[in-house]
Amino acid sequence: MLSFLRKISIVGKIRDGLPTGDEMEATEGYRDGKNRALVSRSDTELKESIYDLLRTIKDPEKPQTLEQLDVVYEDCVEITRQTPKGVSVIRIEFNPTVPHCTLATLIGLCIRIKLERHLVDLFKLDIYIKKGAHSTEHEINKQINDKERIAAAMENPNLKELVEKCIQEEE
């Protein structure tokens, strides 16, 4: 099912909304200070929309998507409230194809970059490898949730090009 998120295009990018309570309200047309439209909907629709973004990411080694390889799955997205100001935490769990996958860090980086480009800043992203699914999950989880390491990785032109290729939308 193609979600509502995929139907909203703002400056060539799809943006997501800011939750305002237990239920989110539809607020099309409102713009934040950075000239980005905020479009809110229920947590279930938000989870589906985020999954729609994740499932199209291509594997760095294979011609399939992360969905086709069962690296991401419908239940891999969890949304929780963490702060009194209403900032939600989006927790993504992914499952590498093998316990010693050498590209698990790169997959996590692709997930983070794609979501950061498509979500409003008032979300906190936590990205993790499924517990017990990788031999070095603790180290990889630490890397893909460290802002400085992410920024440094995206300064590498070869790595940046590879990430761009993996997250590029099919037209």
Image (tube, rainbow, N blue to C red):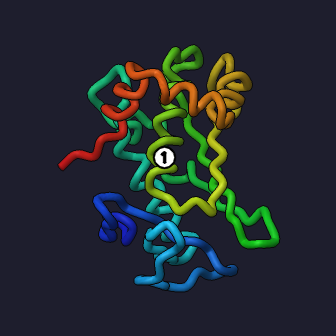
Which corner quadrant of the image does residue 62 belong to?
top left
Q: Amino acid at mark 1?
A: Tyr
Horizontal and vertical percent position of residue 43? 58, 71
* Residue neighbourhood size for the residue with mark 1, other residues' Cα within 10 Å, grouped as few (<14), some (14–19), many (≥20): some
Q: How many marks?
A: 1
Q: Is residue 44 left or right of residue 88?
A: left
User: In front here: 54 or 115?
Assistant: 115
Please determine whether, in this image, residue 128 is positioned above or below residue 12: above
Q: Is residue 110 left or right of residue 19?
A: left
Tell me which residue sits at (71%, 22%) in the image. 139
User: In front here: 48 or 88?
Assistant: 88
For disc 1, the marked residue is: 73
Horizontal and vertical percent position of residue 11? 31, 63
Tell me which residue sits at (65%, 79%) in the image. 20
The N terminus sits in image quarter? bottom left
Q: Looking at this rendering, what residue extends furthest in the right direction?
A: 84
Q: Secondary structure at mark 1?
A: loop
Tell me which residue sits at (56%, 48%) in the image. 76
Horizontal and vertical percent position of residue 8? 33, 70
Please determine whether, in this image, residue 85 is positioned above or below residue 133: below
Please determine whether, in this image, residue 100 is positioned above or below residue 114: above
Horizontal and vertical percent position of residue 88? 68, 64
Tell me which residue sits at (71%, 62%) in the image. 80
User: In front here: 98 or 142?
Assistant: 142
Please determine whether, in this image, residue 171 is positioned above or below residue 96: below
